[in-house]
Image (cartoon, grey):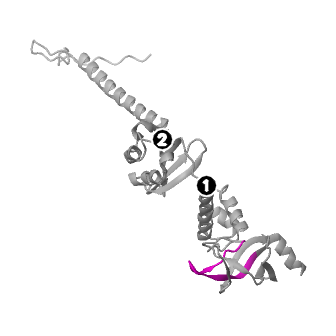
């Protein structure tokens, strides 16, 4: 009894759910917890209409935070409700997202590991999860963050591309330059990649944009011109690409001037043609003996 109450407190489980059984598997280093519920009515996950339970789905398992050195797994059969509008639906459980195999607390730990690690693989090794499982956790975390983000006007936007797999794939990233937040990500670096971001903005948000920083990539320029009011006047090329092109132009002019200078210098140093018919290369007779070598002292 005490162990069930302990895990209920640790998990934050409250009525109508409770821990029905605890099993410790020392050989497998696992703690198995079975959750059950009391007889009650459940809200539809789509419309929140409170309904009587219809039946239960098959038992599912979720990975939870480790208990000391033992992996902890939760087991439960989720009730289903017959919604007259949306049909038979599984109810939401308080400890996990739909279609997730991890509890919310476990997903939080995985995200906290991925952020400081240099690679996702390193975080997977620490958390003892697969790469696909970590990718699912990240996708759900991004979805939760996007759901919490309120639509607001952004004055200064940055548009750039990110190369993956040694440049074979590109993604377009749109950022809020004042808040340093990522606002939009799209595949490729085409006109439609940026146009999709502008299309989802309201008229107020499009009007509120004062400047869009970008490189001199023509698809980004065209999408901004078409997607924003007076978009042509709001494009600001970033300093890096301006300095790169200016340095290249200066180097090109320098190379041309140096080539012209050396060509002129060679022309001025070349000997004038002879008018007497003799060779200008040498005035020494051909039968003159060569000079004797210097004597050694």
Q: Farthest residue toward the top?
A: 276
For the residue labelled by badge 1, is the local secondary structure a helix, a strand or a loop? loop
Residue positioned 34% across, 19% down in the render: 293
Q: Which percent across, then down, holds residue 156?
A: 53, 41
Q: Is residue 58 above or below residue 174?
A: below
Determine if residue 8 is in view. yes
**Which dot marks residue 212?**
2
> Where does the magenta region start and end?
72-94
| 43 drawn magenta | no
Residue positioned 63% across, 66% down in the render: 137
Distance of mark 1 from mark 2, alpha carbons? 21 Å
- Which of 216 and 9 lies nearest the eye of the viewer? 9
Q: Is residue 36 above or below residue 190?
A: below
Residue positioned 23% across, 19% down in the render: 267
Give the residue at mark 1: 149
Judged left or right of residue 50, residue 18 is right
- Which of 65 and 203 lies nearest the eye of the viewer? 203
Q: Is residue 172 above or below residue 231?
A: below
Judged left or right of residue 21, residue 153 is left
Q: Which percent across, then down, holds residue 268?
A: 25, 16
Query: Badge 1 local density, few (<14 within 10 Å), some, or many (20+)?
Result: few
Residue positioned 37% across, 17% down in the render: 294
Disc 1, disc 2: CB below 8 Å?
Answer: no
Q: Which percent across, then down, holds residue 142?
A: 60, 60
Q: Quadrant of residue 54?
A: bottom right
For the residue labelled by badge 2, is the local secondary structure a helix, a strand or a loop? strand
């Amino acid at each position: 009894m005490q162990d069930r109450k302990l895990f209920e407190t640790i998990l934050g489980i409250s009525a109508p759910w409770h821990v029905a059984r605890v099993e410790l598997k020392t050989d497998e280093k696992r703690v198995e917890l079975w959750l059950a519920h009391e007889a009650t009515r459940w809200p539809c996950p789509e419309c929140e209409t409170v309904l009587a339970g219809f039946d239960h789905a098959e038992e599912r398992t979720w990975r939870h935070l480790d208990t000391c050195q033992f992996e902890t797994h939760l087991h439960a059969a989720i009730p289903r409700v017959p919604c007259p509008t949306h049909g038979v639906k599984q109810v939401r459980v308080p400890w996990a997202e739909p279609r997730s195999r991890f509890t919310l607390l476990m997903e939080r730990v995985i995200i906290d590991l991925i952020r400081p690690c240099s690679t996702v693989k390193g975080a997977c090794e620490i958390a003892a999860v697969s790469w696909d499982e970590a990718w699912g956790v990240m996708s759900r975390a991004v979805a939760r963050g996007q759901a919490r983000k309120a639509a607001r006007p952004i004055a200064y936007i940055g548009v750039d591309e990110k190369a993956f797999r040694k440049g074979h794939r590109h993604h377009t990233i749109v950022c809020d330059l004042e808040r340093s937040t990522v606002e939009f990500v799209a595949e490729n670096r085409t006109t439609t990649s940026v146009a999709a971001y502008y299309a989802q903005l309201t008229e107020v948000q499009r009007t509120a944009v004062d400047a869009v920083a970008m490189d001199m990539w023509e698809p980004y320029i065209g999408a901004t011109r078409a997607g924003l009011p007076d978009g042509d006047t709001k494009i600001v090329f970033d300093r890096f690409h301006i300095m790169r092109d200016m340095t290249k132009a200066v180097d090109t002019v320098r190379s041309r001037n140096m080539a012209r200078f050396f060509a002129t210098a060679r022309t001025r140093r070349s000997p004038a043609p002879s008018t007497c018919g003799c060779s200008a290369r040498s005035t020494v007779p051909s039968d003159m003996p060569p000079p004797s070598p210097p004597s050694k002292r």
